[in-house]
């Protein structure tokens, strides 16, 4: 399940954060306060997820203790699966054979990284508005909308608890304000402490697949990679987007490596995966979408590149149409010197599909960039 929040974020009602609330905060400042509260708080409850004709119920525990954050989510519907987060480290436990991606942070990760400085930068591309008062999970909340100023990103609607500033409801919204995905608490409590056993798994992990990833930061350039410069570059990106993470990892079958670049404007994110195909096989090519998640696949020479992200198709197409990859045996160079552009999405040599019959070889088959399985 691609998700808006690793649950919505929280705050302990008895902490000093609640005491410092300012009812006259502007919308951006309110989200910054919620971000800090969501990281340094204790909470537990039940949340529902809906989106893409799906509905799921999850139980969550979150704790901040000894300057460390810990969170555990357990599905209450469908197949048993769990997610444990320790600071920026995700550990996903899911049935054997189920594929998933934890390449990008969920909206919880985005919210938790908000600072006054970042909000000011985001105002170039988003508008922050107050939406008045509402009631979620039996608690009074203040609403904030984050509306994009162009066609390259989605919007958000966040309802935060008036007493604690816990985000109790978060929605991903489309160009007309329609809800694309939503996470909402149905019950929540704020204990002073949560015992260690609340974060222990209740399954025999030998029967499950474990996936672990580190969540990158979204407002800085990536640290120098031990693998050198990325093999993929971009002639043009949607306004505000830049590369914030770069890493290489082995393919599951051991047949080479896959390079992963994470692009972000500080709130929205797109993953770009590239690999050199070592054998002839059918790979994802064209454009596709699953709910708000857009995907774009290209093959150029021996490179297979897939772009996937929870952004509008216009952003995915701009990134894909402006990709640059090195020719075989050539170092990455300036345009016209050993670098080839990928063909455009509307090129007749590429097929357009609604859902890939055969999943991309370098990303999970359900094209999910969130932290929870479908």
Image (tube, rainbow, N blue to C red):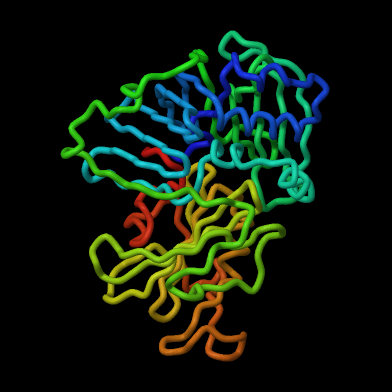
Count up the numbered dots: 0
- Up the image or down, 205 lies above or below 25; here it is below
Residue 351 seen in the current view: no
Q: Which percent across, then down, holds residue 238?
A: 67, 60
Can you say whether 247 is above or below 327 in the image?
Answer: above
Residue 356 x/y as whole percent: 38, 55
Is 351 above or below relative to 190? below
Q: Residue at x 71, y 37 (%)?
A: 146
Determine the residue positioned at 59% across, 8% down: 138
Residue appearing at x 64%, y 53% in the figure: 219
Q: Is residue 318 left or right of residue 257?
A: right
**Quarter residue 205 falls in:** top left
Q: Is 251 situated left or right of 58 in this image? A: left
**Figure quadrant of the C terminus:** top left
For the N terminus, the image quarter is: top left
Spot occupied by residue 294 in the image (x, y as percentages of width and height) = 52, 51
Taking the view exactly as shown, the residue that stands out farthest to the right is 24
């Amino acid at each position: 399940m691609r998700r808006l929040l690793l649950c919505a974020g929280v705050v302990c009602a008895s902490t000093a954060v609640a005491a410092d609330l300012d009812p006259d905060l502007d919308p951006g400042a309110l989200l910054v306060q919620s971000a800090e509260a969501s990281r340094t708080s204790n909470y537990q409850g039940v949340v529902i997820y809906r989106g893409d004709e799906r509905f799921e119920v999850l139980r969550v525990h979150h704790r901040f203790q000894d300057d460390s954050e810990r969170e555990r989510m357990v599905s209450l519907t469908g197949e048993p699966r769990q997610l444990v987060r320790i600071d920026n480290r995700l550990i996903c436990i899911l049935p054997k054979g189920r594929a998933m991606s934890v390449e990008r942070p969920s909206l919880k990760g985005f919210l938790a990284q908000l600072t006054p400085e970042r909000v000011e930068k985001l105002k170039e591309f988003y508008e922050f508005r107050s939406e008045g008062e509402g009631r979620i999970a039996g608690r009074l909340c203040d609403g904030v909308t984050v509306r994009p100023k162009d066609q390259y990103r989605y919007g958000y609607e966040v309802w935060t608890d008036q007493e604690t500033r816990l985000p109790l409801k978060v929605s991903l919204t489309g160009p007309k304000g329609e809800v694309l995905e939503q996470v909402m608490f149905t019950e929540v409590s704020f204990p002073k402490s949560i015992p260690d056993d609340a974060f222990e798994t209740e399954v025999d992990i030998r029967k499950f697949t474990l996936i672990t990833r580190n969540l990158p930061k979204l407002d800085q350039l990536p640290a120098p990679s031990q693998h050198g410069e990325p093999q993929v570059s971009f002639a043009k990106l949607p306004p505000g987007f830049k590369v914030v993470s770069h890493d290489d990892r082995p393919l599951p079958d051991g047949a080479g490596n896959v390079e992963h670049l994470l692009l972000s404007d500080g709130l929205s994110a797109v993953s770009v995966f590239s690999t050199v195909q070592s054998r002839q096989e059918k790979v994802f090519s064209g454009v596709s979408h699953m709910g708000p998640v857009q995907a774009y696949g290209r093959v150029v020479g021996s490179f297979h590149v897939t772009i996937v992200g929870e952004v509008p198709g216009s952003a995915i197409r701009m990134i894909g149409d402006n990709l640059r990859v090195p020719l075989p045996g050539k170092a990455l160079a300036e345009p016209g010197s050993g670098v080839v552009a990928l063909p455009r999405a509307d090129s007749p040599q590429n097929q357009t599909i609604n859902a890939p019959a055969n999943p991309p070889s370098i990303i999970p088959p359900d094209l999910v960039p969130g932290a929870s399985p479908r």
